[in-house]
Image (cartoon, rainbow, N blue to C red):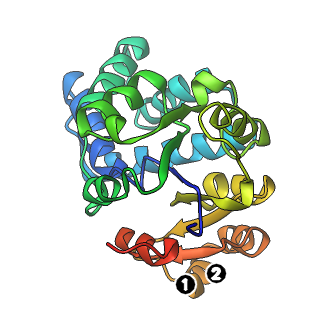
């Protein structure tokens, strides 16, 4: 028997390059209202969006407040007026669902693991967007199931999210032991923290990030790392084979 019974994959920033899709989506939306999307604006939106998702994880905002507030905050900050935020949001979400890029060789890795270990998706994304991206990118057909926070009713890292996943997995797995599951994700505050809180093994995917630099450059995140240390850390996705003790 292998080291683990199943992998729980995060999507954005792990299987798929979210920053690539986000850049294209926000740029198209800004161009659509007659605003030239500068690099500064694109980067600023990324910061605002990330901030809203962190607040959602902490329960400080609702999902609906996040989905609209991130655009309102950006437009207000740059003094852009007379914009139908609902239309802006719809175009953004449609673009995100259509545009994707693989993170490294993620698709090949999941294909190689298909049939050798059960694979699931765990994501905080919007249902329509994630469902579309996973289908178009080919991941949907490789996964044993897909768990989306919007459908479950609470986001990672809340225990309720993972408790739901475990209950549902028991429908297709004879036994589900948290310590024989492995979460693979790039977020310390949602993937890793959530796994630790629920007794699930965790693997932090940290391309280009050194822990010593994290402690200096982002003390708050450094504290999260110390409080919820992952069981494994990888800089390249293909290192997951070494963690699993499975041949490539």
Depth check: 40 or 108 in front?
Answer: 108
Quadrant (top left/top right/bottom left/bottom right) for the C terminus: bottom left
Considering depth in this image, is 102 or 218 the residue closer to the camera? Answer: 102
Query: How packed is label 1: few (under 14 Cα within 10 Å), some, or many (20 or more)?
Result: few
Q: Quadrant of residue 57?
A: top right
Tell me, yes or no, whether the two marked residues, 2 and 1, touch with CB atoms within 8 Å. Answer: yes
Label 2, secondary structure: give it.
helix
> So how many labels did they put on this image?
2
Please tell me which residue is depicted at 66% across the width and 56% down the height of the picture: 189
Residue 50 drawn at (x, y percent): 52, 47
The one of 13 and 9 positioned closer to us in this rendering: 9
Whether residue 126 is visible, yes or no, is: yes
Q: Please, what secondary structure does the residue beneath circle 1 have?
A: helix
Residue 188 lies in what quarter of the image? bottom right
Q: Position of residue 75 (x, y in %)?
A: 42, 30
Give the label on residue 215, or none. Answer: 2
> Vertically, is 200 above or below 136?
below
In the image, taking residue 197 as reference, residue 18 lies left or right, namely: left
Using the image, tell me which numbered label, if any, was put on residue 213: 1
């Amino acid at each position: 028997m292998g080291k683990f019974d199943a992998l729980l994959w995060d999507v954005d920033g792990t299987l798929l390059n979210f920053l690539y899709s986000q850049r294209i989506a926000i740029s198209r939306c800004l161009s659509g209202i007659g605003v030239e999307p500068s690099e500064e604006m694109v980067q600023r939106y990324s910061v605002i969006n990330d901030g809203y998702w962190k607040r959602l994880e902490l329960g400080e905002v609702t999902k609906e407040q996040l989905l609209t507030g991130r655009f309102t905050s950006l437009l207000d900050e740059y003094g852009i007026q007379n914009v139908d935020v609902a239309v802006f949001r719809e175009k953004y979400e449609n673009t995100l669902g259509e545009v994707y890029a693989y993170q490294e060789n993620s698709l090949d890795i999941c294909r190689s693991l298909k049939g050798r270990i059960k694979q699931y998706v765990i994501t905080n994304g919007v249902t329509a967007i994630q469902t579309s991206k996973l289908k178009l990118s080919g991941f949907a057909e490789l996964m044993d199931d897909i768990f989306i926070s919007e459908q479950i009713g609470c986001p990672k890292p809340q225990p309720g999210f993972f408790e739901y996943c475990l209950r549902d997995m028991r429908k297709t797995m004879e036994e589900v032991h948290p310590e024989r599951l492995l979460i693979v994700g790039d977020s310390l505050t949602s993937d890793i923290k959530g796994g630790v809180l629920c007794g699930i093994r965790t693997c932090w995917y940290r391309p280009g990030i050194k822990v010593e630099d994290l402690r200096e450059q982002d003390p708050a995140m450094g504290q999260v790392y110390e409080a919820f240390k992952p069981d494994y850390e990888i800089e390249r996705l293909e290192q997951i084979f070494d963690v699993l003790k499975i041949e490539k």
